[in-house]
Image (cartoon, helix red, strand yellow):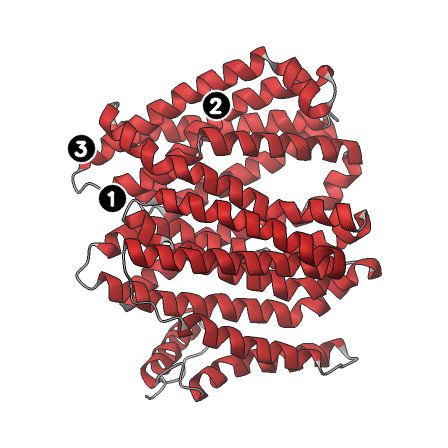
Amino acid sequence: MWEELKSLFKHSTIYSVSGVLGKGVGFLMIPFYTHFLTPADYGTLELLDLSVMLFGLVITMWMNASIIRYYYEYDDTKHRNEVVSTVLLMATLLGVVSASLGIVFGKQLSLFILKSPSFYKYFWLLSITFFFSSLNGVSLAYMRARQRSLWVAGVDVVSLILSLGLNIYFIAILKTGVIGILYSSLATISLSATVLTIAILREVKLAFDLEKLKALAIFGAPLVVTSFSAFALNFSDRFFLQRFTNVSTVGIYALGYKFGFMMSFLVVQPFDMIWSARMYQIAKKPDGTQLFSRIFRYYCLALVGIALGLSLIIKEVIAVMSAPAFHSAYRVVPVVALAYIFQGVYRYVISGMYIAKKTARVGGISLATVGVNFLFNYLLIPRYQGLGAAWATALSFLFMAALAYVASQHAHPIPYRLSSLFVPVILAAILYIGSTRVEISSLFLSAAAKASLFLLFPVVLYLVGFLDRSEVDRAREAAYSLWTRFGWGTAAAPER
């Protein structure tokens, strides 16, 4: 059990570090981009990114998840390699067709998306980039299936450094604007895809299996619907806010949402990257269902603990980082963080449907959740504005997690204890609400008081019986191991 947790923690941390590095550099580069690009340039890039994202959901989303699932369907290397090679050949075919159509209809796409045919060269570059991106996605999915987290993180970091260097060169030195960023993206993704594809072909060789392709397509097709639904869940509230309030409210909400979204790229996404491969191995073990239940308990604890820490300090963080007009953004952060706790739970409990190959149910749940989300947005945003949008997101993800739990229990029963989620959430909510009732003018004293509340969280969990003595001992031993490993102390090991 503890070895599984250590392995999941190690790989999740590696993925998280690369994600944090990318987001951190992105924040630091904001002044640079705003100096050399106009608001119109930003709007153009946003529309281009959005268009490619939606197109990618249709063309390639099903392939990457299918690789990981069917890689662990087989125990022998030959069949596993056939899965990877089959998808790689399919990605090449779809990439070539898509790129060709994008080049041929570049002017029509430019007119439809950017309201002018004069930007057709943007779509030429995007089309070629999409071809390489398809190959790159398959290669990274293969690495995730092999649980090569260091390779994936390394590729991300090298790509980030190369992309930043090229962006600075094209924008600051050549002053090429939007097309310079597109050139930078093409150069980065083509180099990454070429190197990774050659390396993977040396391992798996070329092979094609039509029956495997059919199985992969049947498994992955419903996930396209899931991806569209996730897109709607994350972006629809902005359109409702714009409709019922004003642009300023959208801006303040967007800032707060960005901080709350840290829950996703710090915890949910890194864990999901390793869990999506590891869960199939665990499911084959004799005690697999018990391991699923125990890991769920600690995963929920990590989600809630990080959300509580973020919620406690966010008011001071936003006050330091933003102008006074944006300070009210902190109000939506705890609710958005709660939403991503529920999203993390959803991503975990759908494991049963993936294991049982019932992905059609995942697509149905996603569609139902989008409908509920639109309803919540319509009811809550006109009255509560940004806070209403945050609660609409949180309630939608809770609804989604509940449906996924019920459906997964029918597909592949796992004895989850729901108290693993709701006990920490309730206790964290009490601590957070308590922190809002006390106003301390000193920033230092306020931060110290909130840090004390955060440290009180595990104590309260122990007092109410959520944590038992053996878990406390394990936590103490792990903390001591980290303390001594980094040379911070040499005291004797803690006694039980």
**3 or 1: mark nearer the eye:** 1
Front-most of residues 489 and 18: 18
> What residue sits 27% from the left and 33% below the top?
215
> What residue sits 52% from the left and 39% below the top?
228
Report the residue marked by disc 2: 131
62 to the left or right of 169: left
Report the residue marked by disc 1: 72
SS of the residue at dot 1?
loop
Q: Amino acid at mark 3?
A: Lys
**Quadrant of res 82:** top left
18 to the left or right of 360: right
Tag 3 or tag 2, which sits nearer the N-term? 3
Q: Position of residue 16 (x, y in %)?
A: 48, 54
Report the residue marked by disc 3: 78
> What residue sits 68% from the left and 28% below the top?
170
Tag 2 or tag 1, which sits nearer the N-term? 1
Q: Is residue 203 visible?
A: no
Front-most of residues 298 and 358: 358
Q: Position of residue 443 (x, y in %)?
A: 75, 76
